[in-house]
Image (cartoon, helix red, strand yellow):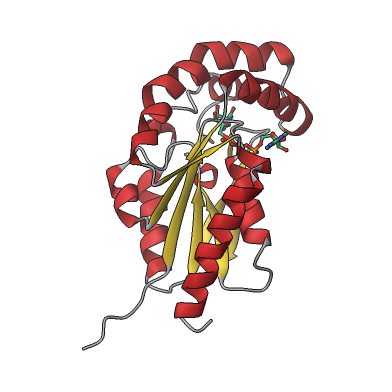
Amino acid sequence: MEKKTKPIVIGVTGGSGSGKTSVSQAIYNHFPGRSIMMLEQDSYYKNQDHLDFEERLNTNYDHPFAFDTDLLIKHLFKLLNYETIEKPVYDYTKHTRSNEVIVQEPKEVIILEGILILEDPRLREMMDIKVYVDTDDDIRIIRRIKRDIEERARTLDHVIEQYLGVVKPMHTQFIEPTKKYADIIIPEGGRNQVAIDLMTTKIDTIFKKRSL
Ligand SMILES: Nc1ncnc2c1ncn2[C@@H]1O[C@H](COP(=O)(O)OP(=O)(O)O)[C@@H](O)[C@H]1O
Ligand SMILES: O=c1ccn([C@@H]2O[C@H](COP(=O)(O)O)[C@@H](O)[C@H]2O)c(=O)[nH]1
């Protein structure tokens, strides 16, 4: 009996501020109206409704324990089985899940993006292509300061304290070491058009093979 095809999972990882969201968006935007979707690991940060705001501020968001990885894996399995999921929505300003969910229909190509997606062997096992966006630490912190103040309602002092206390050491301990699992390493994220073209060409081939 012919083996049924399953959706393709492309994992895109890298440190905070490396440009992995920009790379993933650029790939996704190349295929308007096609069977492709984004799945952000950030959506699977654990619910923290039981903690007060001060405690949430002190959570280590760069440790694998911060994520509800079981739920992410469950949803990924459903998508690979062509089932619809209800994706959680994370609110960075409140440091917890919002009450909303996004109904996400299955697609042929899934771009899974996040800082620690290559850290869990179960997730690695589910990916067909693994990409690591490799950007210097100084560039990443500059981007993070700008983004966290403008978009995530943080103060400069908080961003610096969090970076030195948690983000940097967790990056060294958990994120950087996952580079060895990558099939492709993209230097300097967002604007590496050559790398984005290579990825979109590969996805085009997948669509053609599936007559999509
Ligand atoms: N190549 C780039 N040059 C300049 N700014 C960039 C570049 N790539 C991303 N950015 C900016 O840096 C910030 C972080 O990028 P993002 O793609 O969200 O990174 P990540 O998802 O890895 O945290 C965003 O504000 C984004 O617009
Ligand atoms: O409530 C939260 C949740 C996450 N963070 C930080 O976000 C980054 C991951 O997002 P990127 O888009 O990859 O930067 C992670 O480093 C956490 O520290 C947070 O500050 N608060």
Instruction: Say which residue appears at 43% left-offset and 59% top-offset.
Output: 9
Residue 25 pos. (x, y %)? 65, 52
User: Could you tell me which quadrant the N terminus lies in?
Assistant: bottom left
Q: Is residue 118 above or below residue 81?
A: above
- Residue 8 visible within the image: yes
The residue most toward the bottom is 1
Q: Is residue 127 above or below residue 93?
A: below
Among the 4 quarters of the image, the one containing residue 145: top right
- Residue 47 visible within the image: no
Instruction: Say which residue appears at 69% left-offset and 27% top-offset.
Output: 143
Q: Is residue 211 above or below residue 12?
A: below
The residue most toward the left is 1
Residue 122 pos. (x, y %)? 29, 49
User: In terms of image quarters, where does ligand 2 lie?
Assistant: top right
Tally of numbered tags: 0
Instruction: Say which residue appears at 45% left-offset and 80% top-offset.
Output: 210
Q: Nearer the viewer, residue 173 or 193?
A: 193
The residue most toward the right is 150
Instruction: Say which residue appears at 34% left-offset and 35% top-offset.
Output: 180
**On the rendered structure, is 4 left or right of 54?**
left
Among the 4 quarters of the image, the one containing residue 52: top right
Residue 187 pos. (x, y %)? 55, 35
Residue 57 pos. (x, y %)? 58, 21
Among the 4 quarters of the image, the one containing residue 22: top right
Q: Nearer the viewer, residue 9 or 87?
A: 9
**On the rendered structure, is 154 left or right of 76?**
right
